[in-house]
Image (cartoon, coloured by chain):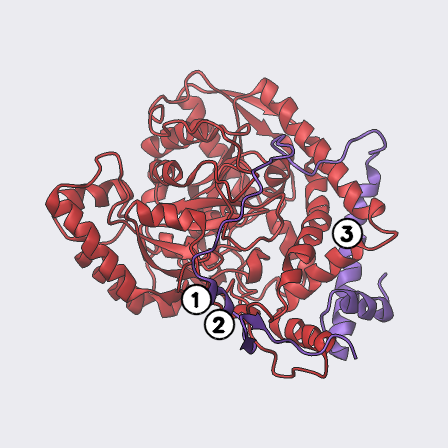
Amino acid sequence: MDLSFLTIKKTHEYLKARKFSAKELVKAYFEKIKKINHKLNAYVLVCEEKALSAAENADKKFTDGTVDEKNLLTGIPYALKDIFNTKNIRTTCCSKILENFIPPYDATVVSKLNNAGALLLGKTNMDEFACGGSNEHSCFGPVKNPWDLSRVSGGSSGGSAAAVSADLCVFALGTDTGGSIREPASFCGCVGLKVTYGRVSRSGVTAFASSWDTIGPFAKTVEDAAIILQTIAGRDEKDSTTPDKNIPNYLENIDDGVSNLKIGIPKEYFSEGIEAGVRNIVMNGVKEYEKMGAKIVEISLPMTKYAVAAYYIATPAELSANLARFDSIRYGRKPLKEGKDLFDYYLNSRGEGFGDEIKRRIMIGTYVLSAGYYDAYYKKAQKVRTLIIKDFEEAFKKVDVIIAPVAPFPAFKIGEKLDDPISMYLADSLTIPINAAGVPAISIPAGFMKGDDFDLPVGMQIIGPQFSEDLLFQVGHAYQKATDWHTRRPNIV
Amino acid sequence: MLSEEQVKHIAKLARISLTEAEVKKFSAQLSGILDYVAILNEIDTQNVEPTSQVTGLENVMREDEIKEFSDKEGLLRCSPLEIKNNQIKVKSVIK
């Protein structure tokens, strides 16, 4: 069975026409995972038995003719970043401290997907507790980029991005706090959606920075991303940050094109710090839109250069508070050295269980929240956040959407930035402002950057006002109808 | 600049044991990060309100109802420690 570029739409048609059964499909994926995963390290756990039994249920619905016509996810194999709680399935956040954690319940979005009949193939690799831009901070080791195994997948949702690009699943979910969906989607050459803050429930997904965290899909096409969001979006009483806001039919206007739209090009996102190859690819994308009739307007987002600094104060502060719950008492791994009292037990559990990047960020967070420093750091960062929000509000008075590069460079070599935290942090300099403002953005493949020894995918992001995901799908889909970058597949050797 | 003493103090507040080598490494790296974020001092934020919630939701209330979780044993099974009378046995807190 050819799994290459198998979209939700196509898979659904084949399942409906009984060209293959869901069971045959799942078996083909596991065969491919067995053949390729050791090269990529994208999956950290596969759930073969559960997926096969879920596939049988899906097949029954197709043969009975009881499949809901509007539900395109029945029998569709997917993967989850290992930060989503899955009932009776190990969920580690790729941290040693959770190496044996088996949640007794499913995250809200997992229940929604499973109820829709989607088939969970396995859990994917990530940077520990979603902190990182390269997927090298994982207790399972780095994910390799499907286009060049010596390079990173991007992070923190690197496993999900690599699994989608390498056709080891039809779609996957990830989380995006400062770029963790869009950056790996750009590096691996697939579609990645960062939703408006609060559009998708975070209940049952381990929190990193609660006022920044979002959940979204990785997919092969923009259209598929729309189909997935349709199922996972919405109010959840278990997550009080999800507003009771109408969920539009995301496919209704997807074919409307861009001829009456104004697209903003923020000059700060095309500055000298961004590699020329990346700038050229994204500008070619913009020209494509111009050909389709969109009006291109140069705009400015002057606070852009401060976003990374605000992020590395505010999010470690929230992380340090959220990760305080990991003390190997209610869950987690017992430290090798238990120590003499509870205090020692805490020290050893966390000292042994957390990796370097988590230790760094917890300590930064603890420092900026400590007495005497709160105003100078945390409060300052939250004020700067207000100014970043204003930037976007002003911009969206002039334009409908904004187009920009996702990352300043394509996938870098494994190990290249590992011991230089700040240079690693700058990988997210163009994605972080979007999280600060809580607006949605979608990363889509826009071309390939060639060098002496590389030929790597580059993504562009389409950014819109809050709750404008339908517009992002419309704009992204128009590009994918006019170009074929998203259909290119890596040759994994 | 964060001294090694300060790093040890922060690590203790955060309940993380560090080796001497880690203290040295983190002292340099954390100092670098704090130097970097000082760029925010370029911005005048005197009359700016801080943001803690981006979509404008406020005081989301619900009824104070008790809902039983269906798998209490499953929750207790997550603990690596001894379970006694549906409680987790921890090391001594008070000497």
Residue that label 3 marks? B36
Residue that label 2 marks? A100
Q: Is residue B77 left or right of residue A301?
A: left
Disc 1 to disc 2, how far (Cα)? Answer: 7 Å
Element type at mark 2: loop
Q: Is residue A70 left or right of residue A338?
A: left
Q: Amino acid at mark 2?
A: Asn
In this rendering, the answer to whether A433 lies above or below A186 is above
Disc 3 to disc 1, how far (Cα)? Answer: 38 Å
Please identify the residue farthest to the right as the structure is shown.
A372
Q: Colour of chain A?
A: red
Using a 10 Å C-alpha cutoff, classify the residue at mark 2 as few (fewer than 14 neighbours), some (14 to 19) or many (20 or more).
Answer: some
Dot in front, 3 or 1: 1
Element type at mark 3: helix
Residue that label 1 marks? A90
Write down the quadrant of residue A465 in the picture: top right
